Image: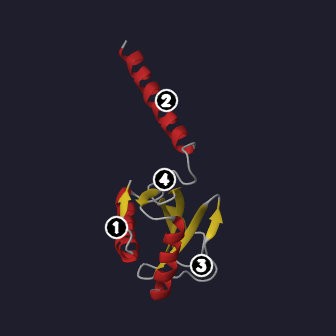
Amino acid sequence: MKTKFIIIIVILVAAVAFFLRIGYLIAPGNYPASENYLINTSQINFLSKIDSFKSRNVRYKVPSLVNKYDSIRHSYNIYFYNYSKNQIIHIEIQRENKNKSVIHLIGINEGLILGNWKTVNNDLTKSESELIFKDFEQNILDRLGIIYKRE
């Protein structure tokens, strides 16, 4: 009797883990593990602030290989270079409505050679991801003068 009970518990735990993983894989959006920030500004205004920020802070510009806006499906992929840590930060901005947008902090690339991407909340531990979020908030969002709400 005890053995059957243990087998049933193991099967239930495995089924729950399986369905959670499936849910994660089919979650809406391009990057379900990203950290999201709701901002009270339009995409265009945010992109303008980024252009201004990068022209004043050239050390945040990524080398020309990836230093561009990649506009796909009404969203923009944007890259910053964290010179102090030698990392490229990847974010995506999506329009929420006319006056609001969502920033998705997606991941980091170690060094300037592409191919070393790590996704926050997935490839990085919780504490490593939290350090990335704090650094992004302090060194980029706060310096852009953006009011944000982390979701």
Q: Which residue is mark 1?
A: 134
**Amino acid carrying mark 2 in the image:** Ala
Q: Earlier in the sequence, mark 4 or mark 2?
A: 2
Residue displayed at 47% across by 76% down: 49
Mark 2 residue crowding within 10 angstroms, few (<14) / some (14–19) / many (20+): few
Q: Residues within 10 Å of mark 3 (few under 14, many from 20)?
A: some
Q: Nearer the viewer, mark 4 or mark 2?
A: 4
Front label number (1 vs 2):
1
Disc 1 versus disc 3: distance between alpha carbons?
23 Å
Earlier along the polypeptide chain: callout 1 or callout 2? Answer: 2
Query: Label 4's element?
Result: loop
Q: Are marks 2 and 3 in contact (CB under 8 Å)?
A: no
**What element does badge 2 sit on?**
helix
- Residue toward you, 108 or 35: 35
Q: In the image, 49: left or right of 63? A: left
Which color scheme is applied? secondary structure
Please report whichever mark, 1 or 3, sits nearer to the chain's N-terminal start. 3
Q: Which residue is mark 3?
A: 67
Q: Secondary structure at mark 3?
A: loop
Q: Amino acid type of disc 1?
A: Lys
Expressed as whole percent of the image width and height from the top left, the position of residue 44 reads 54, 69
Q: Which of disc 3 and disc 4 is earlier in sequence?
A: 4
Tell me where residue 139 appears, x and y as whole percent: 37, 76
117 is higher (above) or lower (below) than 52: above
What residue is shown at x 50% (from left), y 86% (from top)? Answer: 55
Q: Which mark is residue 33?
A: 4
**Is residue 110 toward the left or the right of residue 70 in the image?**
left
- Residue at which label 2 appears: 15
Label 4 CA crowd tier, 10 Å (few <14, some 14–19, many 20+): some
